[in-house]
Image: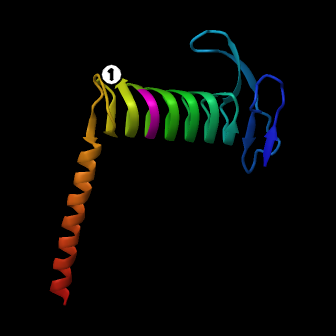
Amino acid sequence: MATRMDTGLTEGIDPTIEGDDLSDTRLPQAVLKASTTKSPTPATELLRTDAGSVEAQTVSLERSGAERITAERVIVSNSGARTVEARSAQFERSGVLALQAEKVVLQESSAVSVVADEVRLVGSKAIFVKAATVSGDAGSRVLVGGGSDGAVQPVVSSTGAAAFGAALGVVLLLLGRLVGRRRG
């Protein structure tokens, strides 16, 4: 069940929230500064709250959690999200399982999967990053990633991971046949 709050603040997308126990929940509105122009921007804000699915033009989470976020711009601080789809996403001391955006900044955050055009990592960790450009500091770690520049280098490249998987498959196949012969 979705609850909508039509405040006239957002254009195009009404802020919504879905969840089993959130049928009477209203999404609070806030005014944030746009990152490049510093102009006031209306946003859906979640403070110390858990949400199912959130859709809005701009979403700001602080000490909160969300299952799914769909927005043009997402700002997450000290929070967690399962799935995020956005044009621009900024995470600070937060975590995300699956993140898809054009531009991503992870600052002291963790991510399992990031798919973006441009990713910047500052003291962050990611397991899988697929991006045209990945940049960041030496304190950042990427397990498997695409092309990167600067100090962020993947621990295992995509081709290295594929080669390891193929070799592991051959070893397991040979061990399976060896154990099968001893039993038979």
Number of on-image labels: 1
Which contiguous range is marked in magenta? 113-119
Give the x, y percent position of residue 67. Answer: 61, 44
Using the rendered image of the protein, determine whether residue 8 is visible from the camera's viewpoint.
yes
Check if residue 160 falls in the magenta segment: no
Q: Nearer the viewer, residue 76 or 145?
A: 145
Q: Is residue 74 above or below residue 53?
A: above
Label 1 CA crowd tier, 10 Å (few <14, some 14–19, many 20+): some
Give the x, y percent position of residue 15. Answer: 75, 33
Q: Nearer the viewer, residue 166 or 143?
A: 166
Give the x, y percent position of residue 134. Answer: 37, 28
Task: Please tell me which residue is depicted at 78% across the width and 45% down the height of the picture.
Answer: 2
Query: What residue did someone put label 1 on?
Result: 137
Farthest residue in the bottom direction? 184
Lateral position of residue 7 relative to residue 106, left or right = right
Label 1: element kind: loop
Task: Please tell me which residue is depicted at 39% across the width and 38% down the height of the picture.
Answer: 129
Check if residue 117 falls in the magenta segment: yes
Q: Is residue 166 above or below residue 93?
A: below
Q: Quadrant of residue 137?
A: top left
Task: Please tell me which residue is depicted at 19% across the width and 87% down the height of the picture.
Answer: 183
Q: Is residue 41 above or below residue 1?
A: above
Using the rendered image of the protein, determine whether residue 77 is visible from the camera's viewpoint.
no
Lateral position of residue 157 relative to residue 122, left or right = left
Q: How is the image coloured?
A: rainbow
Q: Is residue 106 above or below residue 129?
A: above
Give the x, y percent position of residue 95. Answer: 49, 36
Task: Please tell me which residue is depicted at 57% across the width and 14% down the height of the picture.
Answer: 35
Q: Quadrant of the C terminus?
A: bottom left
- For badge 1, the amino acid type reads Asp
Prevailing secondary structure of the magenta residues: strand
